[in-house]
Image (spheres, rainbow, N blue to C red):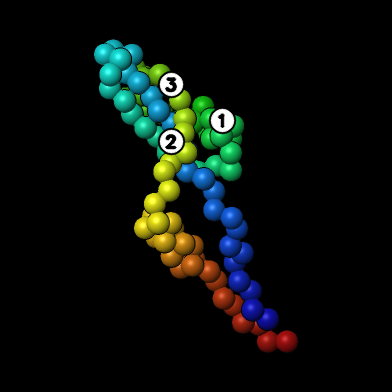
Amino acid sequence: MISVAELSEPMTTWVGVFVSNLDGKTIRELEVEADDEETAIVMLDFYEYDETWQQYSFVGIHKKRWNWLTALFTAFKKLRFINLSFKKI
């Protein structure tokens, strides 16, 4: 019997955008992997931010732009973790 880790549909990378409350210009971004925008926002809401984020406010979210090289690298990482195990019957 061959057991192969299932390759599921890739999750979307969402980018949360935060702006500085001090100058209104400085922007920070935080990426999360989620199936949809609502889940991504919840993940950003429950993210454990350190003290450097205290002066930043969430202003929006968008999907990370697709890049074929990034997609290829992600697929390679998934394939690397496929576990084949042989079992005698």
Give me the residue at 40% from left, 19% from top. 57
Q: Residues within 10 Å of mark 2 (few under 14, many from 20)?
A: many
Can you tell which quarter of the image residue 34 is in? top right
Instruction: Name the N-terminal-most of marks 2 and 3.
Output: 2
Give me the residue at 43% from left, 65% from top. 76
* Amino acid type for the residue under numbered disc 1: Val
Give coordinates of residue 46: x percent, y percent: 52, 29
Query: Are the two marked residues, 2 and 1, in contact with CB atoms closer than 8 angstroms?
Result: no
Name the residue beneath numbered marker 2.
15
Can residue 77 be seen here?
no
Give coordinates of residue 86: x percent, y percent: 61, 82
Does residue 44 appear left or right of residue 39 in this picture?
left
Return the residue nearer the eye: 8 or 45: 8
Does residue 24 appear left or right of residue 33 in this picture?
left
**Mark number for residue 59?**
3
Q: Residue furthest right?
A: 89
Up/down of 36 relative to 61, above or below: below
User: What is the CA distance from the residue labelled 2 to the residue labelled 1?
Assistant: 13 Å
Give coordinates of residue 28: x percent, y percent: 33, 29
| Kind of element beneath mark 1 | helix
**Mark number for residue 42?**
1
Query: Are the two marked residues, 1 and 3, in contact with CB atoms closer than 8 angstroms?
Result: no
